[in-house]
Amino acid sequence: MDIILLGPPGSGKGTQAQKMVERYHIPQISTGDILRGAVKERTPLGIEAQGYMDQGTLVPDEVVVGIVRERLKESDCKGGFILDGFPRTVPQAEALDSTLGEMQRAIDHVVSIEVPNEELIKRLTGRRTCRNCGAMYHIVFDLPAKEGVCDRCGGELYQRDDDQEEIIRARLQVYEEQTAPLIAYYRGKGLLRAIDGVGEIEEIFRNIGQAIEE
């Protein structure tokens, strides 16, 4: 089963991806991770990607697609994969279709975890991080025993800059602008499985299972 997983920041995508890995025994492939891995391993495409990254410019689609292609050819992907963070644009989706076609494969499902922006903002702005050990808390969902103090090490809890409302709204706008054409592309192919991301984790996971197993 070859799956693409979409979801905005704060949608619970990472949690659901891990549960999908455990249930279906297929790897979660994060393009950020494999890009860093290719750079670290000094593969030809990794060296090329590093050149762009060192200049502070975006790695071109053809390089990213090449690195994804290399990863999908590894043995653990024979039974399927969960692509996380790729594709981000319609041209990348078209390049992925072409690459998979050469491998005599195709995307089976595109799971889009959908959560209203106001709920995402509530989730993300409520996060608090320990300055000392990095442990994460939430002022609504996961309170520490003592306000502002980490349960693990006693360190001070603070709100990271990227968890402030103005920055989160900007990130969500970028996500929507990037992803809207992609969602339309996969909906047109009959591959989109829109999942309500509000509710209990297990309930959301059941809905994902039903959507891709029917």
Image (cartoon, rainbow, N blue to C red):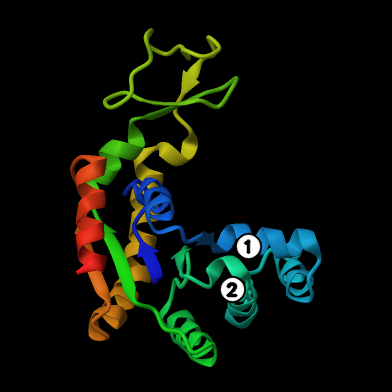
Q: Is residue 73 visible?
A: yes
Quarter of the image where the C terminus is located: bottom left
Identity, as a three-letter code, of the amino acid under mark 2: Val
Query: Which residue does the image show at 22% across and 52% down from the upper left?
Result: 206
Q: For marks 2 and 1, give the CA distance.
A: 8 Å
Element class at badge 1: helix
Is 147 situated above or below 135? above
Which badge, 2 or 1, is on the more N-terminal residue?
A: 1
| Coordinates of residue 42 in the picture (x, y in percent) | 81, 66
Q: Pick whichever, 150 or 206, lies toward us.
A: 206
| Structural crowding at the residue carrying mark 1, measured as other residues with C-alpha within 10 Å and reported as few (<14), some (14–19) or many (≥20) | some
Is 82 situated above or below 22? below
Identity, as a three-letter code, of the amino acid under mark 1: Ile
| Coordinates of residue 21 in the picture (x, y in percent) | 43, 54
Is 66 situated above or below 203? below
Q: Which residue is mark 1?
A: 34
The numbered mark at residue 68 is 2
Query: Which residue does the image show at 37% across and 62% down from the upper left?
Result: 175
Is 1 situated above or below 153? below
Query: Which residue does the image show at 73% across and 75% down from the upper left?
Result: 45
Query: Which residue does the image show at 26% across and 37% down from the upper left?
Result: 122
Quarter of the image where the N terminus is located: bottom left
Element class at badge 2: helix
Mark 2 and mark 1 in contact? Answer it, CB < 8 Å. yes
* Apparent side of residue 56 relative to residue 135 in the rendered image (left or right): right
Q: Is residue 197 visible?
A: no
